[in-house]
């Protein structure tokens, strides 16, 4: 990639950029890497082939592999020269994927991104895409799907409804929903499901 190349914004673009780097085609002249720096760079590229990562996360994974501090620094400089890391775009992709596929709330997404070392301003921008209404609608979808997977007889007695309710509330809380929102959504969806018994 050249100095003016845009930063890859999807996993496919990131994988294509890595493939271009690994190809025998000439790249812009960069200083040679030490042997360990080269190994650390290859390890970084392997990690980035699976999914985008934050700068902090990639640095941590390389140090976990017991590369020396200088080798990790070399690898990070090379990754920066190739423009393969963008924490703001990583945060946007993370929020989009986790909020849609898992129904994760903004609160939990913020915590996850903070653990991955993304700056607060970048997290805030990424989270703007998810509204409170989106979260509540997704909670209703998740609970309705769970209820539909069960046989309707699971809701026929108070004891069974209480058991299902407890499990569904815990399920939503693990995704970051407050107990009040979780209980409200679960009660609403159980009432809707009982109408069809």
Image (spheres, rainbow, N blue to C red):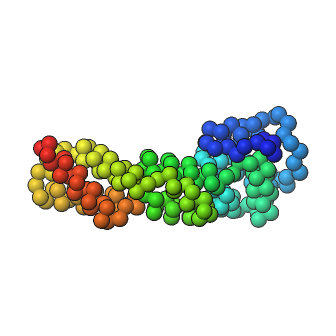
**Whether residue 41 can be seen here:** no
Residue nearest the viewer, comparing 50 with 172: 172
Res. 74 image quadrant:
bottom right
In this picture, residue 24 sits left or right of residue 148: right
Residue at 37% x, 61% y: name it: 177
Picture coordinates of residue 43, whole percent (x, y): 70, 50
Residue at 75% x, 59% y: name it: 72
Picture coordinates of residue 18, whole percent (x, y): 71, 41
Residue at 27% x, 56% y: name it: 185
Residue at 50% x, 51% y: name it: 129
Q: Quadrant of the N terminus?
A: top right
In this picture, residue 128 sits left or right of residue 14: left
Q: How many marks?
A: 0
Picture coordinates of residue 21, whole percent (x, y): 77, 40
Res. 120 image quadrant:
bottom right
- Vertical arrangement, residue 29 with respect to residue 77, above or below: above
**Whether residue 54 can be seen here:** yes
In this picture, residue 85 sits left or right of residue 100: right
């Amino acid at each position: 990639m050249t100095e003016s190349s845009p930063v890859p914004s999807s996993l496919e673009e990131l994988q294509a950029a890595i493939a271009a780097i690994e190809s025998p085609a000439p790249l812009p002249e960069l200083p040679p890497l030490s042997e360990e720096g080269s190994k650390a760079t290859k390890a970084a590229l392997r990690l980035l082939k699976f999914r985008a990562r934050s700068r902090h996360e990639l640095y941590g994974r390389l140090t976990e592999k017991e590369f020396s501090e200088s080798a990790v620094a070399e690898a990070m400089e090379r990754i920066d020269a190739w423009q393969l890391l963008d924490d703001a775009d990583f945060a946007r992709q993370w929020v989009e994927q986790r909020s849609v596929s898992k129904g994760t709330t903004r609160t939990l997404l913020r915590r996850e991104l903070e653990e991955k070392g993304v700056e607060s301003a970048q997290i805030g921008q990424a989270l703007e895409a998810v509204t409170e209404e989106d979260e509540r609608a997704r909670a209703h979808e998740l609970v309705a799907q769970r209820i539909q997977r069960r046989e309707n007889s699971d809701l026929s007695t108070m004891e069974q409804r209480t058991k299902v309710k407890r499990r569904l509330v815990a399920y939503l809380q693990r995704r970051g929903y407050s107990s009040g929102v979780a209980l409200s959504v679960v009660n609403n969806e159980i009432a809707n499901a009982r109408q069809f018994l």
